[in-house]
Amino acid sequence: MRRAVGGYLPLALSVLMVFLPLAWMALSSLKPASEIITTDLAILPQAPTLGNYATAMSSVPFATFFLNSVIVTAVGSVIKVMLAILTAYALVFVRFPYKNAVFIVILVALMVPPQVSVLPNFLLITELGGRNTLWGIILPGLGTAFGTFLLRQHFLTLPGALVEAAEVDGANHWKRLWQIIVPVSMPTIATVGLVTIVNEWNEYIWPLIIVDDPNIMTLPVGLTLLQNSEGNAAWGVLMAGALLVIVPVLVVFAVLQRHIVSGLTQGSVTG
């Protein structure tokens, strides 16, 4: 009984808090406007329709938004994860002056809200000619303090014999990293990759500020354009558009979710 109250009950409540809004969004996306804006509230749609999805995809250049989001997410995530791996490796296995000071700067970056850098980034990217460009969306967020921190902490737990044996065999840093460190660290790298992909896909503030051309907008910003085109009363259309934005992230999460717990809790390598 104590386990049920102290363990399963909070878990069930947490799941419901996450699931119920998503379920309501999915059900509302299947309802016509007359079933949403009404005093006779019904949970299940009485006359389910996919018309909201058709309207959402035809009212705005949805395919363009989707392609832009895929490009920004793919390019940004790959570069971010690569930089995190290289930086974390250098902080653990490479000797250079002021290494601890560099790590402290990374920790400070974790504590600074990203909104603080919006204005300097806007001025810099505008000066470089990056307004209304995909690289202008990608460039300011390429550094990832979280990924570097997580990978560094994991690399510190790896047995020193792994790297020492490779060094004795004459392997340089590049070979040690990609042939030894990366293969045994894949769960943690997958975790960093998942977090990075989700953040890149859902990024809203920066693309909204740096882009005003519909042909360069990403999906989250495109939802704003959809709301402006359909009006505040088209809740079914907006729910359909929001669900189309969320589904790709859920697919990626389903593919990589088994790595999350092992990646965050992996503290040693045994064999």
Image: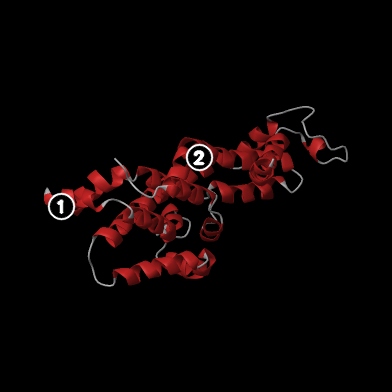
Is 238 situated above or below 203? above
Q: Which residue, as the protein is rendered here, is positioned at the far front?
A: 1
- Residue 219 picture location, percent across and down: 55, 46
Badge 1: few (under 14), some or many (20 or more) residues near its Cα, within 10 Å? some
- Residue 174 picture location, percent across and down: 21, 51
The C terminus lies in quadrant:
top left
Look at discs 1 and 2 and give the one toward the viewer.
Answer: 1
User: Residue at 65% of width from left, 34% of height from top?
Assistant: 53
User: Residue at 56% of width from left, 57% of height from top?
Assistant: 208
- At mark 2, the secondary structure is helix
Give me the C-alpha separation between circle 1 and circle 2: 37 Å
116 vs 219, nearest the viewer: 116
Question: Quick check: 154 left or right of 39?
Answer: left
Is 202 situated above or below 110? above
Q: Is residue 218 visible?
A: yes
- Residue 181 picture location, percent across and down: 27, 48
Q: Name the residue under label 1.
A: 167
Q: Which amino acid does label 2 sit on?
A: Phe
The N terminus lies in quadrant:
top right
User: Residue at 40% of width from left, 44% of height from top?
Assistant: 190
Q: What residue type is labelled 1?
A: Glu
Q: Earlier in the sequence, mark 1 or mark 2?
A: 1
53 vs 100, nearest the viewer: 100
Q: Name the residue under label 2.
A: 253
Judging from the image, the colouring scheme is secondary structure
Image quadrant assignment for residue 22: top right
116 vs 227, nearest the viewer: 116
Is 121 situated above or below 55? below
- Residue 105 picture location, percent across and down: 39, 70
Query: Which mark, by number, is residue 55?
Result: none
- At mark 1, the secondary structure is helix
